[in-house]
Image: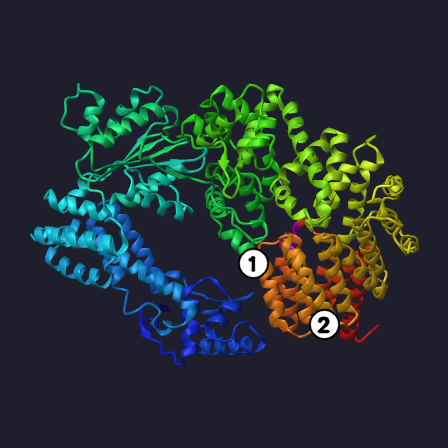
C-alpha cells in the first residue's frame, strides 16, 4: 500500500486507487500516515478529528473506535491499522508515504550537491519534486493539527527547488529555462535570498549580466528600506561573481578541504543559526567554550552549510597539533595545498594571501587557544589583505582582535529533572547519548525504563558532547542504569576516545588537563580553590575562599575568558563552574593539600550568611532574604553535607539550625527532614539552645512529609531540646510525644505558655492542628488552624500563613464546607505567591474544585502547576490529581499515563504519604478495569504504609478504596 499526502489524499494498493469516502475518515488516515510506523496516541487522534471539542472524553473515544473500524474495512489490506497500547499505528514502512520518500530524496540530493555531483543532484531532486501533486496535506489544510507539518513540508519543497536550480546551474543546464523558473520562485517568495542569488547567477550565465546587476541593486535597496538589513553573504557572493565575470560553475573547482562527518550532528540549531548570522555581519567570528563542548564540530558544520554559496570555498586549518607559533601560517598553507602564485621561498603570510581566493572564502581556524598571539596576528593580516575572506575560529578564549564577534558554545541542553519521558528522550543531550550508545552496542535502545538513567548520565557530564560520547561508548560493557553510579570516578572511567585524535583529545582528563596547562599560576590556584563551590560563585565569596596573594577580581575575569568559569545571566554577578571542571580542580586541590583550607573558608562564609539571615526569616523581612538564600542553596547545603561528612559538629549543627526554617518554607519536607537528621546525627557538645531550632524543624518536617521516626533511642536524644527555653522548644514536646506513639501526651497542652512570641504561638497552633487532624479531630484542627493563621498574619510571616490556610482549606473540604475551603485556599495563595511557590496551594485548590464538580477550573490549576516546572513532590501530586479526574471520566488510558508521570516525577525520593496515595490510585484504576486481584495487591501495600504513619486521613483514603473493592467483589 502506498499513501500520498503531497496533494489530495491518494491511496494505492498494487497500482490501483482505493477510494475513501468521508472527510473524517480521510483525516484519520492522513494523521496516521504523518507518523507511519509509529504509534499515534488516542489524544492526538481525537484532537485532529474533533479540534473544536478539547479533551479525549468517552464519546470521542467511542467515535474514534468506530472510525478506525470503518477505515480497516475500507482498506483492502488486512492489518494496516493496528491497535497498540495508548493509540493506533499505520503499519507501513515510512517509505510507503510520499512525504517521507520526498524528505529522503531531498536530503540525498543536497548531499550530492555538496559533493559537486551535479548530475546525481539533478536526478534525485527532480525525482523528489515530482512526488508533489498539489499542496501538502490538501485535504486537511485548514485543520490546526496539520499546520506545523504543512509549513515544514512547504519549506523543504522550496529548499529542494533551490537545490535543484543550483544543481542545474552547476551542470550547465539551459540558463534561460532556469531564469524563468527562478523568476517565478522569487516573485512568489521575494525574501528568499538564496533563490535571488541563484537568479543573479542564472541571469549572468544567460548573458544578462547588466540585468543581474540591476536586480541586485534593487534587492539591496529593498532590504535596506524594508528591513534595515544588508544582503546576505550568498547574495553578495553572487553579485561579486557577476562583477568578476566568473564562470557560473566555477565554485565546484574550489570547494575547500572540509571532510564529510562520520557521525550525525545532534542539536545546536540555535547556535548554528547564530553563527551563520554572525558571519553575515562580521568577518571574524570566534566560537568559545570549554574543552569538549563541541566547538570544532559546530564550526565545521556551519562551514559545510555555507560552502555551496562560497565560490572561494571553505577551508579547515587544524592547529591542535601545531606547537611552534611560527607554524600557524604554514598550517594554513598546508590546508590550501600550498596554492598560490607567489614564490615558494616567499614569506608564509604573503604566500597565504596569494593562496586565498579573491572570491568569497571561509577559513575555519580550529583550536587557537595555545597559539593565541600568533593566530590573532595571522587573522588580522589575512582579513586586512583579503577583503572577500571571513574567518571562523574556535578557541577556549577570544582572539582579542578588534571587530571580533564571539559566540559562546554552551553544553547541550538537558531536560529538567521533572520533564516527562518523551521530553527527556527528545532533549539534545539524551539524543546524542542514545545515538552514540547504539553505535557502540547495536542492542542498545532508549526505553521508558532507562531514559531517566541516560538523562542522569548526561546531567553528570554537564551536557558536554565529548564527555557524553565517551560515556555512551561505555554502554557496550556497562548497563546505562549502572553507568551513572560509576561517574564519581569519571576521569578513570572515560578514557575510550578516538585512536585518531590527539592524545589530549582522547580522554576526559586530558581534555580538561589541556585547559589547565594553559592557565597562569594565579589562575590555576584560584580555579582549584573555587572547585569547592557546588553552586554558583559571587565575587565576594570568591574573595573569602581564594588563596592568599591571588588578585581575585582580575583572575575571575581571566577564568571566564578561558571558559573555566561561566558568567550567569540575571541580576548581580555570579559565576558557575561545570561539574566536570570542578571535579578536576578538586582532584588537584586535594593532591596539593589545599582542600581543607578552602572548604573551611567556604563553610565559614556560608555559615555567616545563614546565621545573619536566620532572625529575619521568621517575620516580614523574609522576602528580602529568601532570594539570596535560594541563590546560594547549593552552596549552603554543600557546606552542611561537607561538615557532616567531616564530623565538624559545630559547623554542622549551627548551619542546620540557621537553615532549618529556610529548608522548611521551601516545601520539600521529606528532603528537609533528611538533611536535618543527618546534621543532628553528628556527635556534638554544642549547647542544646543552639540545636533546638534544628530539632524542632526536623520533627515538624518529618510530620509534614508523612514519615515516621521508628527509633525510640533517636527520639530520646531530642528530649533535652524540649526544655531548652528556646522559642522553638514550644513544639518539640508535642511532636516527640506524637512521633513516639503517645497521642494523648502530644495534645495535653491546651494553650501556649504566657509571653510566647507570635511565631512560637503560631507554630504551636499549627503543629497541634496537624496532630489533631492526624487523629481524626477535624473540628479541633479547624480551630487551631484558624488561630495559627491569625498569629502568622499578624506577624507578617508568609510561610506559616500559607501552610495554615492551606490545611484549613483541606479540613473545611473534608468537613463539607466547600465555600469555606475555597476562601481559605484562595487566601493561602497570596502569601504563597509572595514566596514564589504556590504550587501546593494550587493542587489543593484543584481538589476543592473537583469536590464542587468544577473540573474545568481544576484542570486549569493543575496544568498551571505542571507548566511551571514545580518541585518534584508538587508535580507528582498534580499528575496524580489529573489521573484521578481522567479515571473518573472513564479515560483509563489517560489515567494510567498520568499515574506513570506522577511516579516518574516523585522518583526515588517519594515520601510515605505519596506512596500510600499512589498505591490507592492504582487500586482504583485496577477496579475500574475489573482487575480485582491487582486492586487487592495495591491495597495491601497502601494499607501497610497508612498504618505505619498512623495518619487518620491516609487510613480513610485506603478504607474508602477497600469499600470499593468489597462492593466490586460482593463479599466482606
**Quadrant of the snapshot with the C terminus:** bottom right
Secondary structure, mark 1, is helix
Among all residues in the image, which is located at the extreme bottom?
21
Badge 1 or badge 2: first in the primary sequence:
2
Quick check: 782 left or right of 88?
right
Q: Which residue is mark 1?
A: 867
Report the residue at 35% width, 39% height from top. 299
Magenta-drawn segment: 903-907
Secondary structure, mark 2, is helix
From what the image shows, is residue 328 above or below residue 781?
A: above
From what the image shows, is residue 150 above or below residue 712?
A: below
Nearer to me, 466 or 379: 379
476 in the magenta segment: no
Q: Which residue is mark 2?
A: 819
Q: Locate residue 779, reporting x and y percent.
A: 84, 66
Q: Locate residue 612, reporting x and y percent.
A: 69, 37
Q: Locate residue 177, reporting x and y percent.
A: 12, 59
Instruction: Note whether residue 69 is visible.
Output: yes
Q: Locate residue 689, reporting x and y percent.
A: 83, 37
Quick check: 601 left or right of 379?
right
Nearer to me, 307 or 224: 224
Any mark on residue 285, and which?
A: none
Most common SS among magenta residues: helix
Report the residue at 27% width, 57% height from top. 160
Amino acid at each position: 500500500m502506498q499513501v500520498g499526502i503531497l496533494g489530495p489524499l491518494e491511496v494505492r494498493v498494487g497500482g490501483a486507487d482505493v477510494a475513501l469516502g468521508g472527510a473524517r475518515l480521510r483525516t484519520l488516515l492522513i494523521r496516521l500516515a504523518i507518523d507511519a510506523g509509529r504509534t499515534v496516541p488516542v489524544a492526538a487522534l481525537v484532537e485532529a478529528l474533533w479540534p473544536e471539542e478539547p479533551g479525549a472524553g468517552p464519546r470521542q473515544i467511542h467515535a474514534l473506535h468506530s472510525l478506525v473500524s470503518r477505515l480497516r474495512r475500507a482498506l483492502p489490506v488486512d492489518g494496516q491499522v493496528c491497535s497498540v497500547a495508548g493509540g493506533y499505528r499505520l503499519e507501513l514502512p515510512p517509505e510507503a508515504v510520499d512525504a517521507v520518500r520526498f524528505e529522503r530524496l531531498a536530503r540525498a540530493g543536497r548531499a550530492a550537491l555538496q559533493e559537486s555531483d551535479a548530475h546525481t543532484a539533478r536526478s534525485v531532486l527532480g525525482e523528489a519534486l515530482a512526488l508533489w501533486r498539489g499542496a501538502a496535506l490538501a485535504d486537511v489544510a485548514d485543520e490546526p493539527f496539520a499546520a506545523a507539518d504543512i509549513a515544514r513540508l512547504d519549506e523543504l519543497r522550496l529548499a529542494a527547488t533551490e537545490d535543484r536550480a543550483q544543481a542545474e546551474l552547476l551542470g550547465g543546464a539551459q540558463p534561460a529555462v532556469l531564469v524563468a523558473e527562478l523568476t517565478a520562485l522569487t516573485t512568489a517568495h521575494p525574501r528568499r535570498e538564496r533563490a535571488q542569488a541563484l537568479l543573479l547567477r542564472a541571469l549572468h550565465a544567460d548573458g544578462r549580466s547588466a540585468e543581474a546587476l540591476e536586480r541586485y541593486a534593487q534587492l539591496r535597496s529593498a532590504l535596506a528600506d524594508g528591513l534595515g538589513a544588508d544582503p546576505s553573504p550568498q547574495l553578495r557572493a553572487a553579485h561579486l561573481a557577476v562583477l568578476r565575470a566568473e564562470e557560473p560553475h566555477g565554485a565546484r573547482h574550489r570547494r575547500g578541504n572540509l571532510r564529510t562527518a562520520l557521525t550525525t550532528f545532534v542539536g545546536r540549531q540555535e547556535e548554528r543559526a547564530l553563527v551563520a548570522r554572525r558571519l553575515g555581519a562580521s568577518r571574524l567570528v570566534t566560537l568559545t567554550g570549554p574543552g569538549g563542548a563541541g566547538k570544532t564540530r559546530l564550526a565545521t558544520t556551519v562551514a559545510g552549510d555555507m560552502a555551496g554559496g562560497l565560490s572561494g570555498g571553505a577551508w579547515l586549518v587544524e592547529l591542535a597539533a601545531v606547537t611552534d607559533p611560527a607554524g600557524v601560517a604554514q598550517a594554513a598553507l598546508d590546508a590550501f595545498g600550498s596554492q598560490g602564485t607567489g614564490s615558494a621561498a616567499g614569506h608564509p603570510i604573503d604566500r597565504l594571501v596569494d593562496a586565498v581566493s579573491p572570491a568569497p572564502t571561509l577559513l575555519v581556524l580550529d583550536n587557537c587557544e595555545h597559539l593565541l598571539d600568533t593566530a590573532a596576528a595571522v587573522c588580522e593580516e589575512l582579513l586586512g589583505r583579503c577583503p572577500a575572506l571571513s574567518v571562523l575560529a574556535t578557541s577556549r578564549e577570544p582572539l582579542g582582535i578588534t571587530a571580533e564577534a564571539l559566540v559562546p558554545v554552551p553544553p547541550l541542553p538537558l531536560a529538567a529533572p521533572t520533564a516527562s519521558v518523551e521530553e527527556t528522550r527528545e532533549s539534545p543531550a539524551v539524543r546524542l547519548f542514545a545515538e552514540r550508545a547504539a553505535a557502540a552496542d547495536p542492542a542498545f535502545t532508549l526505553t521508558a525504563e532507562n531514559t531517566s538513567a541516560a538523562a542522569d548520565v548526561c546531567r553528570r557530564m554537564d551536557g558536554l558532547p565529548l564527555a557524553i560520547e565517551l560515556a555512551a561508548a561505555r554502554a557496550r560493557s556497562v548497563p546505562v542504569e549502572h553507568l551513572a553510579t560509576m561517574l564519581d570516578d569519571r576521569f578513570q572511567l572515560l578514557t575510550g576516545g578516538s585512536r585518531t585524535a590527539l592524545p589530549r583529545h582522547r580522554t576526559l582528563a586530558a581534555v580538561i588537563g589541556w585547559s589547565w596547562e594553559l592557565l597562569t599560576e594565579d589562575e590555576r590556584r584560584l580555579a582549584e580553590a573555587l572547585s569547592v563551590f557546588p553552586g554558583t560563585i559571587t565575587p565576594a565569596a570568591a574573595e573569602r575562599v581564594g588563596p592568599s596573594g591571588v588578585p581575585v577580581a582580575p583572575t575571575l575575569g581571566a577564568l571566564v575568558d578561558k571558559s573555566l568559569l561561566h558568567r550567569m545571566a540575571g541580576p548581580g554577578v555570579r559565576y558557575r563552574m561545570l561539574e566536570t571542571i570542578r571535579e578536576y580542580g578538586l582532584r588537584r586541590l586535594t593532591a596539593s593539600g589545599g582542600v581543607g583550607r578552602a572548604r573551611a573558608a567556604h563553610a565559614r562564609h556560608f555559615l555567616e550568611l545563614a546565621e545573619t539571615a536566620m532572625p529575619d526569616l521568621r517575620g516580614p523581612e523574609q522576602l528580602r532574604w529568601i532570594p539570596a538564600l535560594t541563590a546560594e542553596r547549593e552552596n549552603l547545603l554543600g557546606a552542611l553535607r561537607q561538615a557532616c561528612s567531616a564530623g565538624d559538629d559545630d559547623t554542622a549543627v549551627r548551619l542546620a539550625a540557621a537553615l532549618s526554617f529556610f529548608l522548611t518554607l521551601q516545601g520539600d519536607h521529606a528532603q528537609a527532614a533528611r538533611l536535618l537528621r543527618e546534621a543532628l546525627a553528628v556527635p556534638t557538645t554544642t549547647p542544646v539552645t543552639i540545636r533546638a531550632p534544628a530539632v524542632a524543624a526536623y520533627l515538624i518536617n518529618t510530620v509534614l512529609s508523612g514519615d515516621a521516626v521508628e527509633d525510640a533511642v533517636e527520639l530520646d536524644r531530642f528530649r533535652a531540646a524540649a526544655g531548652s527555653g528556646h522559642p522553638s522548644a514550644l513544639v518539640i514536646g508535642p511532636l516527640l510525644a506524637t512521633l513516639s506513639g503517645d497521642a494523648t501526651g502530644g495534645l495535653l497542652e491546651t494553650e501556649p505558655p504566657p509571653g510566647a512570641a507570635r511565631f512560637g504561638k503560631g507554630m504551636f497552633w499549627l503543629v497541634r492542628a496537624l496532630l489533631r487532624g492526624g487523629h481524626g479531630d477535624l473540628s479541633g484542627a479547624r480551630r487551631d488552624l484558624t488561630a495559627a493563621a491569625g498569629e502568622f498574619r499578624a506577624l507578617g510571616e508568609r510561610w506559616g500563613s500559607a501552610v495554615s490556610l492551606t490545611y484549613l482549606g483541606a479540613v473545611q473540604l473534608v468537613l463539607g464546607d466547600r465555600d469555606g475551603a475555597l476562601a481559605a485556599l484562595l487566601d493561602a495563595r497570596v502569601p504563597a505567591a509572595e514566596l514564589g511557590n504556590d504550587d501546593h496551594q494550587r493542587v489543593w485548590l484543584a481538589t476543592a474544585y473537583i469536590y464542587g464538580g468544577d473540573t474545568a477550573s481544576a484542570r486549569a490549576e493543575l496544568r498551571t502547576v505542571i507548566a511551571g516546572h514545580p518541585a518534584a513532590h508538587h508535580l507528582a501530586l498534580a499528575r496524580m490529581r489529573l489521573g484521578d479526574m481522567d479515571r473518573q471520566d472513564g479515560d483509563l488510558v489517560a489515567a494510567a499515563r498520568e499515574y506513570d508521570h506522577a511516579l516518574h516525577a516523585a522518583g526515588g525520593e517519594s515520601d510515605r504519604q505519596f506512596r500510600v496515595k499512589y498505591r490507592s490510585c492504582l487500586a482504583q484504576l485496577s477496579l475500574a478495569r475489573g482487575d480485582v486481584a491487582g486492586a487487592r495487591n495495591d491495597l495491601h501495600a497502601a494499607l501497610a504504609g497508612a498504618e505505619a504513619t498512623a495518619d487518620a486521613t491516609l487510613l480513610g483514603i485506603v478504607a474508602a478504596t477497600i469499600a470499593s473493592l468489597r462492593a466490586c467483589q460482593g463479599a466482606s
